[in-house]
Image (cartoon, rainbow, N blue to C red):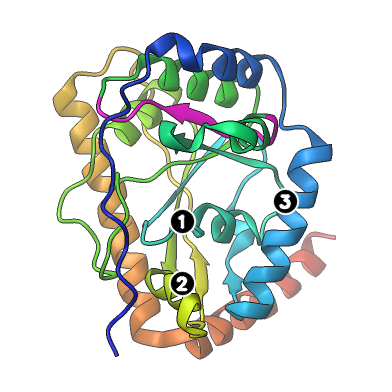
Amino acid sequence: MPDVELRPQVYKDARPKEEFDRYHALIRDHEPEAKVYEPVRVGTVIWALLAYRARGYGSENVPNGPVILAPNHASFMDHFFAGAFIRRRVQFMGKSQLFKGIGAWVFSHGGVFPVRRGYHDEEAFITAFRILARGGAIVMYCEGGRSRTGKMADEARPGIGRLALGSGVPVVPVAILGSYQVRNWRRLQFPQVTVQFGQPFRFEMIEHATREQQQEAADYILERIRDLHSELTRVGRRGARRAARARRREASPKAARQG
């Protein structure tokens, strides 16, 4: 049976820039509010663990302080999968079409900020840099829109390269396996989802990087995600679990010797 089809994506939001200024102002001046973020986090994590048997490995690779989490993107749940296995409040750009009605209040008070679809949205980058400057964690996708087949994009969008170069903060590649079939819940089909966090890396900070430099950095990030995703696909969840156990066993003697 084929997967449930996604609705066509809307690539342009006709509302004026001023419609979203209040959301950016809120995010720039405040951390995600616990009264909103934590209930949403608890609910989505429970749903991910029970419905999709989601498991995460390598979360020790996510450092404290400012960081960019860079997952592959195949589902509306990917930001929740990426944040489910780390003890940090992650923030992410959400397409501007989500900022309507009660959803706009929940998203903005929970730390999500809009990116205006169909335009060069400088405000979204100003907000992202502000979050990193205060030590926050941002989920950002190389691929732009969601994959409808689980296959990763051939080329990255330069935005993540701009953010990584302009901030100089660590980037953690994240591979999410199985999430493109999450939409099949409508048929009571629930795929198994596995999340693997890779080793962090960082670029030398370039305050005013050229478009070519941004694209080169973005392509490198996408390649690291691709390698991680390919390896996770090859070894599967059992292999990822065995590797995680081996790393913990290796780390324990080192910790004992240092103590």
Magenta span of residues: 109-118
Residue at the image point whose x is 60% and y is 38% from the top: 103
Identity, as a three-letter code, of the amino acid under mark 1: Phe
Residue located beneath label 1 in the image: 76
Please report contact status of discs 2 and 1: CB closer than 8 Å, yes or no.
yes
Please report contact status of discs 2 and 3: CB closer than 8 Å, yes or no.
no
User: Left or right: 246 with respect to 234?
Assistant: right
Identity, as a three-letter code, of the amino acid under mark 3: Val
Q: Earlier in the sequence, mark 2 or mark 1?
A: 1
Badge 1: how crowded within 10 Å, few (<14), some, or many (20+)?
some
Q: Nearer the viewer, residue 79 or 70?
A: 79
Q: Is residue 179 above or below residue 20?
A: below
Residue 113 screen position, x and y as percent: 53, 29
Residue located beneath label 2 in the image: 182
User: Left or right: 150 with respect to 192?
Assistant: left
Please report contact status of discs 1 and 3: CB closer than 8 Å, yes or no.
no
Q: Is residue 228 above or below residue 82?
A: below
Q: Nearer the viewer, residue 84 or 202?
A: 84
Say the numbered circle drawn on residue 40: 3
Residue at the image point whose x is 55% and y is 17% from the top: 24
Q: Earlier in the sequence, mark 2 or mark 3?
A: 3
Q: Is residue 28 visible to the viewer in this orientation of the structure?
A: yes
Badge 2: how crowded within 10 Å, few (<14), some, or many (20+)?
many
Identity, as a three-letter code, of the amino acid under mark 2: Val
User: What SS does tag 1 mark?
Assistant: loop
